[in-house]
Amino acid sequence: MKPKRTASEITGMGAAVPEKVLTNFELAKMVDTSDEWIRSRTGIRERRIAEDNETTSEYGHRAARVALDQAGLSPKDLDLIIVGTVTPDMCFPSTACFIQEKLGAVNAAAFDVNAACAGFIYSLSLADGMIAAGQYKNILILGAELLSRITNWQDRSTCILFGDGAGAAVLQPSQGDRGIVKTYIRSDGRLNHLLKMPGGGTIFPPGQEAHNGECFIQMEGREVFRHAVNCMGEAATKIIEENGFTGDEISLVIPHQANIRIIEAVAKRLDVPNERVYINVDRFGNTSSASIPIALHEAQQRGLINRNDLVLLVGFGGGFTWGSALIRF
Ligand code: UT7
């Protein structure tokens, strides 16, 4: 198929994760579980956990510095910062504003996107559209999370899944037909009850003792699993077919790293062999909006993304939200 002109391209990527590793064996000392159960049901072996005094914006800042260096930009060159997060430093100001301050990105606008684990794809879609409209030139997008802060460490059905970290990318106007080929985002608010952190908003305002338990991730695991496979399958096949490609032409799939079984089910639906699907859920667990940019950066660092490769990003999250992006590198 003849390559079509793109509006924006990724010119820099970065990631930052905590040093502290929490293994399944350590978790098994905290709740009634086992390494064998966690590995066979999720593919996760270990995850990274931030120190108590660290913040989401610190990890976002570190990831942003790496991405800016790669793009050859200084923070002052940035016009816009968009951060996908469900674990902001504060309810407001936005984590994007905290990262802006840390970077010294004094010429930028900054805001957060709450699309749960689809936050990075939503941010990418927004940034690409704003560059296409000619409104901005140098945009920093991030997925940054400290999920350990909203994890109930006594609930074995959720605490085995999540981890902390951040990933970033710089988007700039493209010079030709390489860059963001297309993005696709969707949501279905009817499924809002399946995956949520109810506390801290207007329904369960902060500071009410009775509602402390609401400040943790709550999830209907099996239902989330079922919808995740359907939504990611739809987002992936739709974007490939509607843009005239076939699964064969995808060089690498970077899926949201939630569960190895979800990833394998989606890969099967796409008819893409497992070796063309990037997986690091075993080492980082589910880092929500950060999982795709961390994986993207890691894949690039490992030399798995070459010039002209067509890379598919696909993710889903609470909301329900889901989406995909096709990128020609
Ligand atoms: O970014 C999106 C975030 N969320 C997800 O991606 C989650 C999607 N869902 C999942 O990944 C899976 O549903 C889980 C990994 C969370 C759970 O796996 P499952 O195969 O759906 O297990 P289940 O919830 O149906 O539970 C099966 C059994 C239950 O015991 P009984 O009732 O059969 O006796 C659970 O109590 O496993 C038990 N169980 C555990 N056992 C050992 C639940 N959690 C654990 C655990 N260790 N950590």
Image: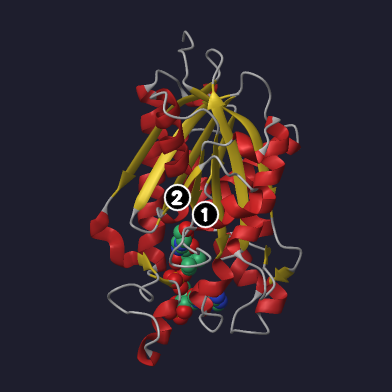
Say which element carries label 2: strand
- CB-based contact (under 8 Å), mark 2 and mark 1: yes
Q: Kindly identify which residue carries mark 1.
A: 97
Left/right placement of residue 148 relative to residue 186 reads right
Q: Residue furthest left?
A: 190
Q: Residue 66 or 318: which is nearer the viewer? A: 66
Q: Kindly identify which residue carries mark 2.
A: 111
Q: Residue 256 or 139: which is nearer the viewer? A: 139
Instruction: Tell me which colouring the rendered structure shows.
Output: secondary structure
Marks 2/1: CA–CA distance: 7 Å
Q: Residue furthest front?
A: 106
Left/right placement of residue 246 relative to residue 36 reads left
**Image location (x, y in percent) of residue 157:** 49, 75
**Image location (x, y in percent) of residue 163:** 61, 64
Which of pointers 2 and 1 lies earlier in the amino acid sequence?
1
Say which element carries label 1: helix
What residue lies at 50% left-to-right and 81% top-to-bottom?
155
The numbered mark at residue 211 is none
Disc 1 packing (10 Å; few <14; some 14–19; many ≥20): many
Q: Is mark 1 within 8 Å of ligand 1?
A: no
Q: Residue furthest top?
A: 2
What residue lies at 60% left-to-right and 79% top-to-bottom?
33
**Image location (x, y in percent) of residue 180:** 49, 26
Above-or-below relation of 308 to 106: above
Which quarter of the image is occupied by the C terminus? top right
Disc 2 packing (10 Å; few <14; some 14–19; many ≥20): some
What residue lies at 52% left-to-right and 14% top-to-bottom?
177
Residue 106: in sight, yes or no? Answer: yes
Residue 276 location, quadrant: top right
**Image location (x, y in percent) of residue 29:** 68, 84
Above-or-below relation of 115 to 81: below
